[in-house]
Image: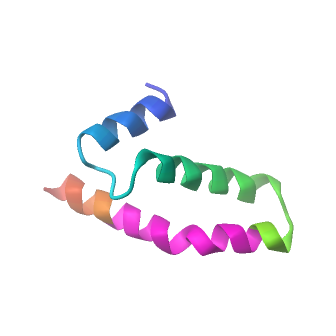
Amino acid sequence: MDFNEIMRTTDKVGLLLNNLEKRIEYRHKRNVTSHVYDEARAFEVAFITDAFKEEAEYLLKELKK
């Protein structure tokens, strides 16, 4: 199973707090931090971290059920 298949499956079974597009955006931002070193991009990534944390906490809660 590749990343996109895993994300589609987790979305179908209700393990994602937000929609699939949001998860793809998180992954894109993670890739940006690995390859770009400018302040504007850093702020762009930092801006989304709270939403990602919320998503991760939701996933953990759902997996513990």
- Read off the magenta span: 42-57
Q: Nearer the viewer, residue 21 or 58?
A: 21
- The image shows a total of numbered marks equal to 0
In terms of image quadrants, where is residue 32?
Answer: bottom right
Residue 8: name its quadrant: top left
Residue 49 image point, x, y percent = 55, 70
In-image side of 40 versus 58 (left or right)? right
> Where is 31 relative to 5, above or below?
below
Return the x and y of residue 65 as percentages of the image width and height: 13, 56
Say left or right for 61 vs 21.
left
Residue 52 position in % (x across, y down) = 48, 65
Q: Residue at x 49, y 34 (%)?
A: 3
Q: Who's the residue at 30% across and 63% down the image?
A: 58
Q: Main secondary structure of the magenta part?
A: helix
Seen in the picture, residue 15 relative to 6 is either above or below; the reply is below
Render colour scheme: rainbow
Residue pictured at 22% horizontal, 53% vertical? 63
User: Residue at the location (75% across, 70% down)?
Assistant: 42
Would you say residue 35 sits in the magenta stretch?
A: no
Q: In the rendered view of the protein, which quadrant contains the N terminus?
A: top left
Q: Is residue 46 magenta?
A: yes
User: Which residue is most to the left?
Assistant: 65
Q: Is residue 41 left or right of residue 31?
A: right
